[in-house]
Amino acid sequence: WTFEEQFKQLYELGDEPDRKTFLDDLFAFMQKRGTPVNRVPIMAKQTLDLYKLFRLVVDKGGLVEVINKKIWREIIKGLNLPASVTSAAFTLRTQYMKYLYPYECSKRKLSTPSELQAAIDGNR
């Protein structure tokens, strides 16, 4: 897989009208803040759909809400990931924090990094 092919996959995972706009905006945002997305996250041997993951988490109120309410299972279902992936919740949280949380903070302002840390600490 070349870099381009991997990224192309993210754009082709669904035909939502705003998928391309979202991904273009996300990649430009991450590039600008000095943390470019230079490889596509993989989960359960498939490309992690950053668009869908962001939508699912934001629809539930954002990352801090998902952590506090412990509703990763719903997110996992929404992404059609196999239930057998044992560390799915932890992996998704890690990937979301790396690839999507800065974007969520900037665009949606659903929480702050200190609230996120409190949520993580409170759910250990």
Image (cartoon, grey):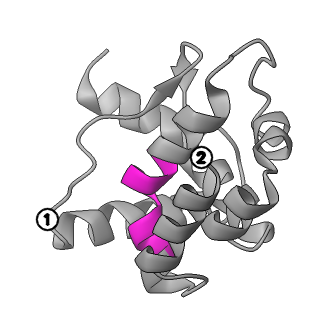
Of badges 1 and 2, nearer the viewer stands: 2
76 left or right, relative to 91: right
Residue farthest to the left, as pictured: 34
Q: Amino acid at mark 2?
A: Arg
Q: Quadrant of the N terminus?
A: top left
Q: Which mark is residue 124?
A: 2
Residue 82: x and y in percent read: 77, 17
Give the mark count: 2
Above or below residue 7? Residue 65 is: below
Magenta stretch encompasses residue 96: yes
Magenta stretch encompasses residue 58: no
**Tag 2 secondary structure:** loop
Label 1: how many Cα within 10 Å (few below 14, some 14–19, many 20+): few
Residue in view at x 43 percent, y 71 percent: 103
Q: Nearer the viewer, residue 67 or 5?
A: 67
Residue in view at x 46 percent, y 43 percent: 95
| Residue range highlighted in magenta | 95-104
**Is any atom of residue 11 visible in this view?**
yes
Which of the 4 quarters of the picture holds residue 64? bottom right
Residue in view at x 53 percent, y 77 percent: 115
Q: Earlier in the sequence, mark 1 or mark 2?
A: 1
Query: Which residue is label 1 attached to?
Result: 34
